[in-house]
Amino acid sequence: MVQPEQPTPGQRVERLRRVAGLSRERLAGLAGLSPTTVKFIENGRRALTLRAAQQLAPHLGVRDLADLFGPTVTLSLDGRPSHPAVDEVRRALTAWHVTLAGEPESTEYLRGAVDSAWQTWHTSRHQRTEAGAVLPGLIDSTQRAARLHTGEARRVSLALLAQAYHLAQAYLAWHGDRELCWLTVDRGMAAALDADDPLAIAQSIWYAAHLLRAVGRGDEALERLREVRGLIEPRVADGGTEYAEMLADLHLCAALTRARTGDQGAWSEWDAARQVVQRALPEGFVGLRTRVSRPLVDVYAVMCAVDLGDPDEAQRRAHALDPMSIPSTERRSRHYVELARSADLESAPEATLHLLGRAETTSPETVRYSPAAQDMLVRLTKEAPASVRAEAVALARRAGVVE
């Protein structure tokens, strides 16, 4: 007797959503996912991950995840590809200095070290390897300075320590333990608050918001961003470019957070960032650590359009943006990944593969560790037309996605 074919996890999600009387947009908003993600899960173009299942289950009336995955599906506990330096960074983050001796590095030296590390992050093709090499020493030096300095030098050291933790979060985001990411967020926030530095506090909120959004707590992220904008906005007029740069970045973070939940209000946040950059920052301005600039604002427009599931708008926004104008190798590679996602939305595998190839040429480590790039590459190795499948397999092998 022929056994009936089991529904896929995506088909199970769609059936349960319809039974619950929810639109994709409504379910996505409740679960903290984008409508595009829910659509792709349902039609099989994106795998149902354990995290997504946990976010969807309460809103579909599911108490046992077997109702989503089915009896024949096994769940792998393998994590994302891990970078070789993660263990050393972890040791630096959990090496508490009970006793300290000697003289701390000067704040001028530490500022130069932090700025150099961020410059490396934005200019290297292998930013994760190079950041992983300097992070343990940077964390150690800034921790020591924050403990040993006094007065104003201690406040400055604490703000720089927060920056070291922010770089650690950027490094760990795609391949570290989630607990380590939360540790860097909490440590960075504590250092910024102790420094009593509005810019340091706002930067810490910015990094915290990205992690809150990633775990489905977008409403909390938006609330924290609104709160800290009240700290920064009154200082923009007299505080110099750093405050305008920070305000623009807070609006961009809010725009992306709204877009990830299908909220068209993303465009008002994006436009607020655009206006700050145009009115309050000089022509050609590029933030040292944030890379806030006119091109970066355009990059966010493409990202928002993709996350809102509008490939036509994404391509329109991208048409006038020269990727070489993006003042960060890492962000430029991520831009190509976003364009690949846009092509993927339109079921254009050749274009998707071409753009992922451009991303890999720009920064191999961005493709190797980007969950979105990995997901597209896995599907291309199975679904790309025969004429380009060998190319897809070769790229997936270089990226470590397949053996």
Image: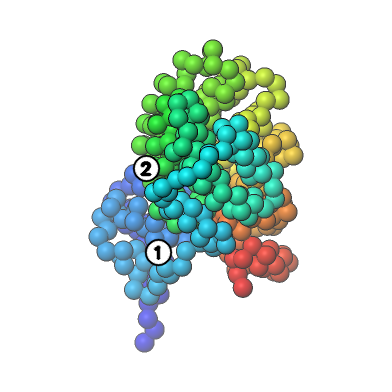
Q: Residue furthest front?
A: 102
Image quadrant in which the C terminus is located = bottom right
Q: Where residue 395 sits in the image (x, y, percent)?
A: 68, 63
Q: Residue at x 53, y 39 (%)?
A: 104
Q: Quadrant of residue 4?
A: bottom left
Q: Decide: is 282 above or below 2.
A: above
- Return the residue at label 2: 217
Indicate the position of residue 85 as horizontal and vertical percent values: 56, 59
> Is disc 2 surrounded by few (<14), some (14 to 19) or many (20+) residues within 10 Å?
some
Calculate the distance from the C-alpha at mark 1 to the C-alpha at mark 2: 24 Å
**Residue 231 screen position, x and y as percent:** 42, 21
Q: Is residue 325 left or right of residue 245?
A: right
Q: Type of residue at label 1? A: Pro
Under mark 2, the amino acid is: Arg
Asked if the residues shown at circle 1 and circle 2 are in contact, with their CB atoms under 8 angstroms apart, the answer is no
What residue appears at the point 57 percent right and 62 percent down from the top-left corner? 84
Q: Which mark is residue 9?
A: 1
Q: Nearer the viewer, residue 50 or 175?
A: 175
- Dot placed on the residue nearer the N-terminal end, 1 or 2: 1
The residue lying at 47 percent from left, 21 percent from top is 232
At which x and y percent is residue 69?
37, 66
Q: Secondary structure at mark 2?
A: loop
